[in-house]
Image (cartoon, grey):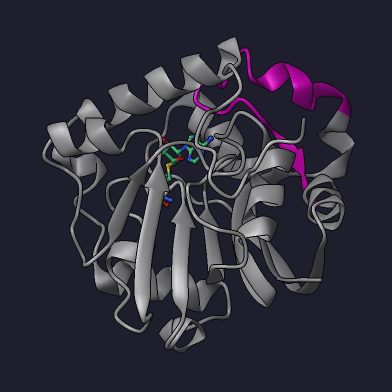
Amino acid sequence: MSEDHSTSVSSPPASGHWNRSQEAETRFWEGSADRYGHFSAEYWERMLAQDGLDPSFFEGARVIELGCGPFGMIHYLDTPREKIGCDPLIETYRELGLLQDGGVTHLAGRGERVDLPAGSVDVVISYNVLDHVDDPLGSLREAHRLLTEGGRMYLNVHSFPGFLRPVLPWLRYVDTPHPWHFTTAGVRRLLGRAGFEIDRSLSYPVRLPGSSFKQRVAQKIALHAVFLAHKT
Ligand SMILES: C[S@@+](CC[C@H](N)C(=O)[O-])C[C@H]1O[C@@H](n2cnc3c(N)ncnc32)[C@H](O)[C@@H]1O
């Protein structure tokens, strides 16, 4: 019997890696305020500008951020007609007193199964999330399902150069917060398999705060891969 994904919110069992990454995510946000004091409308405008966008991209649209975190950009945009934020840790963020309001309707749950009808949003944001989810292709397919015909996807995800491809499946054992490590070409392929056509893409080096050995290595090799795509 086929499953009605337009209303189902039940999720498949999460993998051990995903559970561990979400525990690491929770520990991160339980830490001190200097980890999140930088989030503001101005911060997100700078991040958008870095990706060649400005808030007019969301003008008058019904927008969902999959994996919105407590301070994701959806909370600070004032151009959308309607704002929705989905994250499995919504209740944790609320209990920690971190969850921003920003006029956002929060949905607690995974981005692989969102309790909204097909074709009900104009723009999906996935910012620093795809390498955190349990099922990246499932998450992109769900984004595709949620979008109206021609609806737009804004994806920003950490990626690695192609020569590192053989070692990427092993990185989850040392980089626990991230169950997935992609090459930029790998992300491009996933978008295609999920039914997206890419309109624009760019990449630039990741700048991380801190100077631990792991952070210094990551700064040298990790990239932000940015894709603007539309539903075909
Ligand atoms: C690094 S944070 C990014 C939060 C926000 N987008 C930002 O840029 O500030 C990653 C977020 O992805 C969420 N996440 C993990 N797995 C997810 C899934 N399967 N579906 C949706 N969100 C997920 C985590 O709970 C966490 O809030």
Is 230 within the magenta? no
Identify the residue at horizontal 64%, vertical 19% (top origin): 172
Q: How many marks?
A: 0
Is 182 within the magenta? yes
Q: Quadrant of the C terminus?
A: bottom right
Locate residue 15, reporting x and y percent: 61, 15
**Who is closer to the viewer here, 122 or 95?**
122
Locate residue 78, reporting x and y percent: 29, 80
Above or below, 57 relative to 105: below
Above or below, 195 relative to 18: below
Residue that protrudes farthest toward the front in the picture: 1
Q: Quadrant of the N terminus?
A: top right
Identify the residue at horizontal 79%, vertical 52% (top origin): 194
Q: Which residues are magenta?
A: 166-184
Identify the residue at horizontal 36%, vertical 47% (top origin): 107
Q: Kindly tell me whether residue 174 is visible in this rendering.
A: no
Locate residue 82, reporting x and y percent: 35, 74
Locate residue 141, reporting x and y percent: 72, 49
| 221 sits to left or right of 216 | right
Residue that protrudes farthest toward the left in the picture: 97
Identify the residue at horizontal 40%, vertical 21% (top origin): 24
> Dividing the image into four equal quarters, which quarter contains ligand 1?
top left
